[in-house]
Structures are given as C-alpha cells and as structure tokens.
Image (cartoon, rainbow, N blue to C red):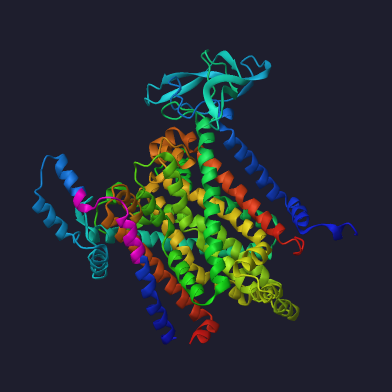
Amino acid sequence: MKRYILRRLLGMIPTLAVISVIVFVVIQLPPGDIVTATLEQLASSGVDMSDERIQNMRAQYNLDQPLPIQYLYWIGNFITGDMGFSYLYARPVNELVWERLGYTFLISVGALIFTWLLALPIGIYSAVRQYSVADYTFTTIGLLGLATPNFLIALVLMYLGHSWFGISVGGLFSPEYLNAPWSWGKFLDLLTHIWIPIIVVGTSGMAITMRLMRANLLDELQKPYVTTARAKGVPPFKLLMKYPVRIAINPFISTIGLLLPALLSGDAIVGVVLNLPTTGPLLVQSLISQDMYLAGSLIMLLSVLTVIGMLLSDLLLAWVDPRIRYERS
Amino acid sequence: MNDLEHISPRRLAWLRFRRHRLAMTGGSILIVLYVLALLCEFISPYGPEQRNVRALNAPPMNVHFFDEEGQFHIRAFVYSYDLTINPDTWMREYRENTSTRYPLQFFVEGEPYELWGLIASSRHLIGVEVGGQGYFHWLGTDSLGRDMFSRILYGSRVSLSIGVIGVVLTLFLGVLFGGFAGYLGGVIDSAVQRCIEVLQSIPTLPLWMALSAALPTTWSPLTTYFGVTIILSLFGWTTLARQVRGRFLSMRGEDFVVAARLIGASDTRIVFRHMLPSFSSHIITTATLAVPAMILGETALSFLGIGLRPPVVSWGVLLQQAQNYQVIVMTPWLMLPGAFIVVTVIAFNLLGDGLRDAADPYGSAR
C-alpha cells in the first residue's frame, strides 16, 4: 500500500507540471502585461515615466526575460508560496486567495456530501422499485436538475426566497457578522446561509450520480448470487445493503475525482450570482480586468485542489477494493 | 416473419427509435426550436433592437378572447398598458387599458428585415397593426423596451447553433485522437491518455473563462462567436476520445479488422472504411448528448460577461440582464430565456437516450 501511495504521489508531479504550463500560456495570451497596465493607469493620471524607469519596472517583474525563464520564475515563486501581486486589488495574491479558498473548499465538499446523501439512497430506491411512480418522479427531477444551469437555479431561488418568504438570498453572512471576528454566533450565521449555495452547486451532479447508482445496482441485482441469497431467505434489506449496494457503490469513490472539477466550476459561477466570498467572483473580476497573476494563481490552485481530490479518491478506492491494491503492487 | 428478415439495420433502428415516445417528443421539440431559430426574423413580431418606449420593463401580456363584457371574439386581441407610479413604493405599475382592443393579425407589416440576408421583407408572422397605439409583447419587454420574445428567438439562433458547431469540432478532435490512440496503441496511446487525464483534471469553467477573457474585445461578433465555440470544444473532446479509444481497442482484434489488414488495406482505409462505420451510431448518440454541455457552457460564459457580448444576442447574453437581485424581483420575466435553455437541454437529453437505445437494434427490448 505504501508503495502504491508513493507511486501515485510521484505520478501527480508531471500532471501538475503540464497543467502549470497550460495555465501559464493562458495567462500570457491577452495582449499587454502588468507593466503596460500600470503605465496606462499612470498616463491617465498625468504621470509620465522615463524609459529607464520602465525598464527597471520590467526587470522587477522579470518581464525582460524570455518566456520560458518567466515561466520558471512564476512557477518557482508559486511553489515557494509567493503568488505575486494583484494590481487590481493592490494586495499580494496570497492574502486575497487564502481567505476565499476556504469557503470554496467548504462549499464544494458540502455539495459533494449533499449530492451523495440524497442521490445514492434515491438511486438505490429507484433500482429496487424500477419503473414505479417514484422512480419516474425522481428521474424527472434529476433531469430537470441536469438541464438547469447552476446560476439559473440560484436566480430562481433568489426570486422564490423574495416572493415567498420575503428574505434576500445571497452572501454567506448577515451584515452584522460580515466583518466580525470568528465566534459561535458567526458560525451559526454561516450555517444558516451556506446551505443555499451547497444545494445549488450540488444539484448539477445529482442527476448523474442518481442514474449511475440506479444502473450499477440494476446490473448487480440481476446476478445469480442475489437470487441464491434471496432463496436462502436472507432478509431483503440486509441482503441489499450487504452485497449489491456495496459493490455498486465502489465506482462512485473513483468519480469523486471527476465530480470535483464540476463542483469547482459550479462554485465559480454560483459565487458570482449569490455574491459569495469564494474564489469564483474573484476569478471573474480578475479575468475581466486582466489581472493575470491573480487569475493564473487561482486557476492553478483550483487545479491543484482537483488533482489532490483525484489522488484521495484513488487511495480511498484502493483501500476499499483490495483488487486494485494487489493488481498494482 | 418473412418481412422482418428484409429490414435493414437502419430501418430497424428507426422502428426502435419511434417506439421511444420520450425521444420522439424531445426530437419534435428540437425540430420546432430549430425552425423557430431559422426563421426568427419572420416569426418574431419585432426586431431585436427595436425599442418601444411606451412599454419599458412591461410584464408579459395576456392574449384575450373575451372582452370586458364577456363577449367572445373570434380574433384574439391584446390591450395596451397604462403606466402608473405607485405612490407608496415608487414602483412602475402597468395596468391593462381595456378601452381599446388591438386584434392580433397574421402577416402584419413591421420592421423591414432580410431573411438569411437574401429575402427582403417587412411581414411578420403575428402582431398588431402598426401605426395604431397597440403593441404586442407576450413575453414582456426589457428595460430598454425591447420585445423579449423577439430577442429570445434571435438569441436561439446563436445559442442553438453554437452547440451543434461546437459538437462537430469536438467529434472531429475526439475521433481523431481517440481513434489514433486506440488503433496505434503503444507510445501514442499512453501519450494521448496522459493528455486526457491532465485536461480532465483542470476545472473546465475557470479555464474556459480564462480563455474567453483572452479573446480581444476588438474582435467582430462573428469572430468572437467562433472563438468561443473553439474554446468550448477544445476541452470537450476528452470524454469522446476515451470512448472511441475503448471501442477501437476492443475492435482491433475482431476478425473483420484482421482480415482487412491481411489483405493489405492501409491504416486509414481500415479506420475509416471498416472500423468507424461499425460504431458511427454510437458516436452520433454521444454527440447528441454532448450538445447540451456546449449550450450550457456558452450560456454560463456569456452570463458572466466574458463570452459573447452585446450586440450579439444569445440566451446567455439575455440572462446577463437578470443578474442582480433587484432586477429579478421587479422583472422576473427577464429570466424567461432560462426556460428555453432548460427545455432545449432536456429535449437533447431525451433524444440522446432514445438514440442510444435505437443505436443497438439487436439489444433486448425495453
């Protein structure tokens, strides 16, 4: 098992390296850079910079170097924990990102748990009671969830929240707790707000999870061992939970890795609509104003989160399913 | 029984598809939507930028058959709106002015247009007579007084086509990479596999956002449109490539492929003449199921303001107006383009499910 973990850890490195190159290329795409942007800003306020100063500034950001060297500087700093400076917010990227990444992580993991808690039991029920009214109802609801863009669900919730309950949906905290230090009250306040983004982000993965669970379990239920166990008189519920469900649930552990990018994507857009203090709105803002250090660091961090999530799901799968462990070692 | 033996696989698939009632419904809805998009200049009562200053932010209109006295009229009609400002809330309120009826007519004169840039006309399918005081906004208007229904129709042209064009590109990339990986195997296979793994572990939306934000704002609407399409398909081909690869791997050992190779057929011939046709139906199914993802992608990007931008009209661009809380509460009908998105995506999913069942004509009956 140790060797397997080690191999998987080493396998992450080239993946992350390639991703970092892609991200670097993407953030280099827009014309202009931080120096030209600063110069424009200065020029509009009437300050003229001498050529020498400009050269110095370029050197300060390593912009006088060829691109591969610039990449090395960027990724080197990134690894050592320095993500550069955001000129949009006039603050180091580090400060900006860490305070938001936590909420993004919280909402994504929350959404994952929410999806599973609801979708897996429904999938099991739909498989056991195939073609029942409830099965069709759940399938229809799932299809609706799949077809509705996340942000539209958020918009509709906002509308319903206002017209039915007269509350304003949005944000993660009530105004009085917004800038307050952490306390028990603030935590409770967070809990009363955070379930909305969790539901909104979670619905997109719900339909797929539900249908997959249903299909997996249906395949499993047809197998002879189930008939044998039933013939022997094993209580139906115990039989279901102990054998077919356990096998049918295995593939889901490996889909965490695939679900995570989707959840992070969902959070990116829902954050904008619901005005959440997550990485999404920050990313959109930085992209619109072409604050590329900030944008690049954010995308890179989200990718790292995803890759780690994939690794965890693989390890979990190896832990649950001994066949994988032995085959690889 | 004798007849059955002469049914071609294609006909068998069609027969099977026709039995799938949900898929037929989905298909019909899509046909209607695409016809609407194709003929949007003619069907929409107004032009996409035409403004009606007497009805800014007007709610959807009721189409009446009975007037105030309960009298039935064979020709449907609408009332115009009276605008009042509520003295308590200072909000604009529209009330129907029942003094004059404006009958709806077919083929009315309206804003001139050129259908597909070829046929010049000014006839619109349905509307009220121009010149009078009447107007017809059955899905309401936006803050500039532009007719929502017309704009949704114009938007559907962009939103619906971006999905199809994007999927064609995706198909090309997916079949190309997946096919070569599966057929050639070895180093190329593992290289493509690694490539797919890397691409799949980047959260798609942030990357799409970064790329489309990099599109120069100076580009013409048409170039931006293609730019966004290419971006969407650039990262969408991985799933398809995986499936194609799997098929190729399992098919490589089949007798007919080995036979073709022994005769001395070239690699390209084997791939395109022998292997591809045997799972083209499968590819079509996957493509159908991939269209919604493209449509949702475009919508999300445009909604955030980094995909297509006005004056281009797409469903995402239209929804951009409904971004803040106040707008949603005051003018909820601006969310209507969302309903069109939902219906389209569901229809594509139903159609895809049906195609999947039909693609395997010898499979067990449902």
Does B317 appear above or below A93? above
Camera-side residue of B205 and A254: B205
Residue B347 coordinates in the image, percent (x, y): 62, 47
**Total tally of numbered discs in the picture:** 0
Instruction: Specify the farthest residue to the front.
Output: B264
The answer, for residue B348, to whether it is visible in the render is yes
Q: Residue at x 75, y 53 (%)?
A: B14
Left/right of residue A55 with respect to residue B218 in the rendered view: left
The answer, for residue A193, to whether it is visible in the render is no
Q: Predominant secondary structure in magenta?
A: helix
Residue A302 coordinates in the image, percent (x, y): 36, 62
Q: Residue at x 20, y 55 (%)?
A: A91
Camera-side residue of B2 and A238: B2
Does A4 appear above or below A201? below
Residue B306 coordinates in the image, percent (x, y): 38, 46
Q: Residue at x 82, y 57 (%)?
A: B7
Left/right of residue B163 with respect to residue A81 in the rendered view: right
Does B60 appear above or below A324? above
Q: In the rendered image, which quarter contains the N terminus of chain A?
A: bottom left
Residue B109 lies in what quarter of the image? Answer: top right
User: In the image, which residues are magenta?
Assistant: A20-36
Residue B296 coordinates in the image, percent (x, y): 50, 49
Residue B362 lies in what quarter of the image? Answer: bottom right
On whether residue A321 falls in the magenta region, the answer is no
Left/right of residue A261 with respect to residue A83 in the rendered view: right
